Image (tube, rainbow, N blue to C red):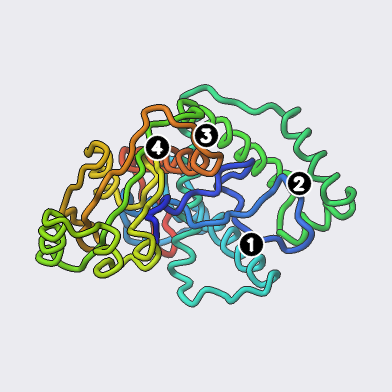
Amino acid sequence: MMRFLSRAGLALFGGCAVLFLSACASAQPTQSPTLAESPVSAAGAATTVPNTTVTPTQEPLAASVNGQRITLAALNKEVARQLDGIRAVGDPIPADMNAERDTVLNTLIDQDLIEQAAAIQKITVSDADIDGEIQQDIAAAGGKDKWTAWLSANQLTEAENRDRIRSALITNKMRDIVVGGIGNTAEEVHARHILVASEATANDVLNKLKGGVDFAALAAQYSLDTSTRQTGGDLGWFARGELLEPAVEDAAFSLQANQTGGPVKSKLGYHIVQTLERVKDRPISPETRYKLEQNAFALWLQSLEKNAKIEKYPGGSTS
């Protein structure tokens, strides 16, 4: 399984921004990375609006985000760029193109939400900042000719590229604000668990534990978590926000050292959780810090989505 580690995160760290969708179609500047993972979906907050008749003077829309328009042309161009990038690296084209389009649209929606939040914070990016990034990109590409060829391969004009860099830098500034409270230490617990399919089995395991049977032996016998059962169900050390299953994490943090709790229900089944150790200010690894930052940013973005007015227009609308 699992270790129930961090949720699929946005590719927003280490200089990346939501808007960079395409895989490299040629030698790609290091400052223009691709979107490594699917973004947090805005679909839960979105309203799907029926299509309306398009007149020649009205530009069809793919979505609106708090009144800000995302045109169908912009969506189509991003989808085409994404597909070109996939072809360039030899990956298979997604079988479900409707899902792929929705993923791209959700990415554009999320980028609008980030930039709207940044505007409220009065975050800006100067032309000099963008020029500096472009010079780094040119150097990384091996010269201006190769950089220009990269723009062409990725269907980008220089103006579009500047807009994308501006979005990336704004996103990074918002990220720094959102994750700024995460330090180099955190409260962590060292816990282990036994995952079973039913509550009845979980209660049976609990009774065996109360009768003195060894936790590790029961994990090896009963646990459905194939990644941990041979190590006694050990989940290792983790901080709040690091496990994929919040119920298991909450249970581990609710217990004192050497206490056992459960059954705890999750989408995977039922867990018996035992906290072995806990430390209030334990130094965290760079990997853990990265996961905590990802999760903090994802939760912040989800809160924006929840409070936003997002409308999607299948096939395009002139609303």
CA separation in Å, label 2 and label 3: 25 Å
Marking on residue 98: none
The image position of residue 304, as x and y in percent, is 37, 38
- Answer with the quarter of the image where residue 313 lies: bottom left
The residue that mark 1 highlights is 81
- The percent position of residue 50, horizontal first and vertical second, equals 32, 61
Residue positioned most to the top: 122
Please name the amino acid that badge 3 sits on: Arg
The residue beneath circle 4 is 300
Q: Judge whether residue 175 can be spotted in this image.
A: yes
Q: Amino acid at mark 2?
A: Glu
Which label sits in the foreground, 2 or 4?
A: 4
Mark with earlier residue (4, 3): 3
- Gap in angstroms between the C-alphas marked 1 and 2: 15 Å
- 126 vs 263, nearest the viewer: 263
Lower position in the chain sequence, tag 2 or tag 4 = 2
Q: Which mark is residue 158?
A: 2
Q: Determine which residue is flagged by label 3.
A: 175
Front: mark 2 or 3: 3
Q: How many marks?
A: 4
The image position of residue 153, as x and y in percent, is 76, 62
Q: Is residue 134 left or right of residue 85?
A: right
Between 10 and 109, the one nearer to me in the picture? 10
Q: Would residue 262 appear left or right of 103 to someone viewing this image?
A: left
Image x and y of residue 202, in percent = 15, 62
Could you tell which of marks 3 and 1 lies nearer the N-terminus? 1
Give the residue at x 9% y 65%. Answer: 200
Q: Above or below — where is 26 with respect to 58?
A: below
